């Protein structure tokens, strides 16, 4: 049943802010999806709930197990050359860069670069750096990004860690560690240091 515009206006006038009941108990279904809707206290409404309830993992230290992880870092544009040269020095060769715009804790406030402040709109220009590394490289890469990108001010950025199911090299069809390995990369640096 579709509601007409006057009916929607009347519903808004009688209850402008629907209250949602907090449901802290876990439901019996092991699924992360629940078709139960929050109670909106809208009388005489036969509309079905259109938004699923999504529950987070029960353990705060839950990390999905994977051989590879993608590190996504949202950084200040002028810090990217410092970060990328530090990653190259540690043997990381595969990096993807994208220009992005958005806001977070900085709230779209002015950005500082070389002593001058600028702001065009509420979205701040940032750079997204994406790196896929093996599990044993994750912490070293994250530490290097933080060391090189941190200024200590709001707007330094965020780092996201995403498990990757598989890595496949398009040219050869290689999968897994063979596809992730690059000539002159971290594995070559480690093996040459061990043989010396």
Image (cartoon, grey):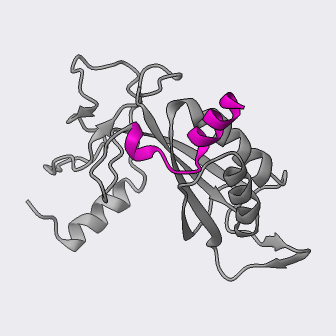
Q: Residue at x 70, y 48 (%)?
A: 145
Query: Residue 158, position in %: x, y?
Result: 64, 50
Query: Is residue 26 placed above or below 50 in the rendered structure?
Result: above
> Which one is in front, 183 or 140?
183
As drawn, 13 above or below 29: below
User: In the rendered image, is residue 49 in sight?
Assistant: yes
Q: In this rendering, is residue 66 above or below 75?
A: above
Residue 136 as seen in the image, left or right of residue 6: right
Q: Residue furthest left?
A: 1
Q: Position of residue 64 (x, y in %)?
A: 41, 28
**Chief secondary structure of the magenta portion:** helix
Magenta residues, start to end: 177-196
In this view, the residue in front, 112 or 44, is 112
> Between residues 77 and 7, which one lies in front from this camera angle?
77
- Find residue 143 and report its image quarter: top right
Tell me the residue at 59%/50% (across/down): 184
Residue 128 rendering spot, x and y as whole percentages:
57, 61
**Is 157 included in the stretch rendered in magenta?**
no
Residue 120, horizontal then vertical, whole percent? 68, 83
Name the image quarter holding the N terminus.
Answer: bottom left
Q: Residue furthest front?
A: 196
Q: Is residue 185 magenta?
A: yes
């Amino acid at each position: 049943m579709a509601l007409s515009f006057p009916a929607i206006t009347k519903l808004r006038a009688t209850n402008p802010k629907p209250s949602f009941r907090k449901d802290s108990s876990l439901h019996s279904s092991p699924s992360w999806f629940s078709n139960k809707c929050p109670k909106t206290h809208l009388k005489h409404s036969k509309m079905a709930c259109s938004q699923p309830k999504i529950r987070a993992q029960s353990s705060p230290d839950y990390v999905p197990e994977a051989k590879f992880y993608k590190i996504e870092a949202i950084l200040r544009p002028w810090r990217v050359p410092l970060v990328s040269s530090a990653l190259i020095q540690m043997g990381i060769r595969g990096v993807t860069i994208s220009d992005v715009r958005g806001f977070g804790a900085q709230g779209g406030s002015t950005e500082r670069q070389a002593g001058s402040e600028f702001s065009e709109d509420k979205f701040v220009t940032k750079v997204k750096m994406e790196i896929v590394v093996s599990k044993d490289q994750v912490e070293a890469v994250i530490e290097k990004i933080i060391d090189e990108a941190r200024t200590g001010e709001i707007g330094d950025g965020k780092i996201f860690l995403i498990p990757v199911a598989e890595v496949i090299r398009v040219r050869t069809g290689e999968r897994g560690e063979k596809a992730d390995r690059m000539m002159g990369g971290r594995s070559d640096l480690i093996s040459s240091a061990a043989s010396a």
